[in-house]
Every structure is written in C-alpha cells, then in structure tokens.
Amino acid sequence: MKDETDRGGDEAAVADRRDGRPSERAAAAQTPSDRSATFYVPHGPDFGERELSQAVWRGWRRRCPACGTGPMMKNYLKVRDSCTVCSEELHHQRADDGPAYLTILVVGHVMAPLLGAAWAAWRPDPAVLATVFAIGTVSASLWLLPRFKGMMVGFQWAKRMHGFATDLVTTAAKGKEESA
Ligand SMILES: [Zn+2]
C-alpha cells in the first residue's frame, strides 16, 4: 500500500515537471507535509479509476483507450497527440522501445522452435527455409508491433502513468485550494 502511494507520488512529480511548472521552487516554498499532499495522485473508484482490460483491448485494436472509437495511430506507428473523436490527450504516452521488446520476445519464442521443428520434419532446402521464415518473421513483427504499442499506451492511460495523471493532480490541487 505504501509502495503504491510512493509511486503515485513519483509519477505526479514527473507530470508536474512535464507541465513546465517549476516544481523544485514550488516544493521548496512548501512544508514537507504540503509537498507530499501536492504530489500524491489520488486513485481508486472515487477518482475515476480506469478499467485496465478494456483500455488494453482498445489499444490492441489501435483505438483510443478512452472512447474506443478514434484511431490511436497516425500512419503506421505514430501515436496521435489527441483523439480525433473524443479529444482525449494521448501525447502523454511513453511506450518508448517497450513494444519492440514485446514483439521480439513473442516472435522469437514462436519462430525459433518452429524453425527447428520445420527442419526436423521436412529437411527443406535451406534457402527455402530461410526465405519462408524471413518473410514469416518480418510479417509477424510488423503485424504485432503497432498492436503491442497500442496495448502499452492503453496500459499507461488506464494506470494514469506519466502525464496521464495530470488531470488528477490539477483536480487535487484545486480541491486543496478550496478546502484551505
Ligand atoms: Zn477517443
């Protein structure tokens, strides 16, 4: 539980910095208890927790995780800055090389045993084997890569990772001002 809270705090701090706000100065002006209250990202059903499996499934279909309708990608792999249908901000995503890692992990673990099995079963001409597997591996990778990227963006959106938590931080700050 404590771990969750700490991580939420870190992400909020990152989101704060991305906003271009001078978090160091702001933090210095506050007492330690104020600081933890500001950087804490509220989570749970009362704060609009997002459904993970739905968001990941929508990402697999390369749709916006918020509405499930708008296309997530522009061209092949570029994530849109915001959804064309519901205007949900998607530029907060930090999939980085995660999708490539997942693609290699899956394609490698499927193709390597298949290569061995095909050789053991049919002893094809090596040129034929190499050609078939080269085409198969490249096709599978190109098919999976944008889908894994969509899944990762959906995951980050549902978990309010990175800048996806910005609205919560703003809401929390507003609520704090009102209660003060
Ligand atoms: Zn949308």
Image: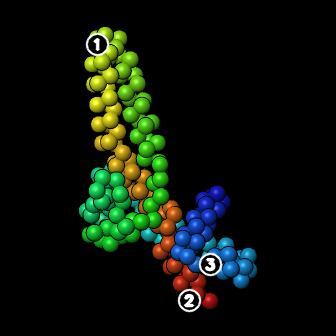
Q: Nearer the viewer, residue 68 or 140?
A: 140
Q: Is residue 41 above or below residue 132?
A: below
Q: Amino acid at mark 1?
A: Pro
Q: Is residue 103 above or below residue 71?
A: above
Between marks 2 and 1 in the image, the one whose residue lies nearer the viewer: 1
Q: Residue at left 44%, top 69%?
A: 48
Q: Nearer the viewer, residue 122 or 151?
A: 122
Measured Cα–Cα span from mark 3 to mark 1: 64 Å
Q: Position of residue 4 (x, y in %)?
A: 60, 59
Residue 70 occupies quadrant: bottom left
Q: Earlier in the sequence, mark 3 or mark 1?
A: 3
Q: How is the image coloured?
A: rainbow
Residue 140 occupies quadrant: top left
Give the residue at mark 3: 22
Circle 3 Cα neighbour tier, 10 Å, few/some/many (<14 / 14–19 / ≥20): few
Looking at the rendered structure, the secondary structure element under dot 2 is: helix
Left or right: residue 4 compared with residue 80: right
Q: Earlier in the sequence, mark 2 or mark 1?
A: 1
Quarter of the image with the N terminus is bottom right
Q: Amino acid at mark 3?
A: Pro
Q: Residue at left 32%, top 22%?
A: 130
Give the residue at mark 1: 124
Circle 2 Cα neighbour tier, 10 Å, few/some/many (<14 / 14–19 / ≥20): few
Q: Position of residue 158 (x, y in %)?
A: 43, 60
| One can see residue 156 in this view | yes
Left or right: residue 155 compared with residue 61: right
Between marks 3 and 1 in the image, the one whose residue lies nearer the viewer: 1
Q: Residue at left 38%, top 29%?
A: 110
Mark number for residue 178? 2
Left or right: residue 177 compared with residue 117: right
